[in-house]
Image (spheres, grey):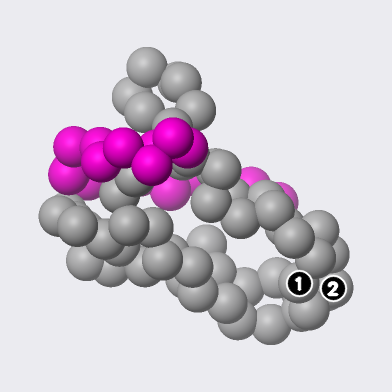
Amino acid sequence: MRQNYPNPFNLETTIAFSIPEDSETKISIYNIKGQKVKDLLNENLEKGNHNVVWKSTDNSGKSVASGVLSLPIRG
């Protein structure tokens, strides 16, 4: 994963990432308390560079507070 932009964000942010091989890819957003806010992506993707836009809503479609997004790196 690369740093999202813009960060801090207001209405939306773009998360850029790359995967080394075709694989099932999941991205979820959690709040500072560790509670899942949004299932952003859950699909099979081809290897390479990808972008996904989060429009700062939760799984029920409600707007969430703007702020800074911290992205963990998982191998």
Q: Marks 2 and 1, Cα distance to the nearest angstrom?
A: 6 Å
Q: Residue furthest right?
A: 22
Q: Is residue 71 left or right of residue 12?
A: right
Q: Is residue 57 visible?
A: yes
Q: Going 28% across and 68% down the picture, which residue do you hit?
A: 5
Mark carried by residue 22: 2
Q: Is residue 34 magenta?
A: no
Q: Residue furthest top?
A: 33
Q: Position of residue 48 (x, y in %)?
A: 69, 82
Q: Going 70% across and 70% down the picture, which residue do you hit?
A: 19
Q: Is residue 66 magenta?
A: yes
Q: Secondary structure at mark 2?
A: loop
Kind of residue sitting beneath label 2: Asp
Q: Position of residue 71 (x, y in %)?
A: 43, 48
From the image, tell me which residue sits under label 1. Answer: 45
Q: Which residues are magenta?
A: 58-75
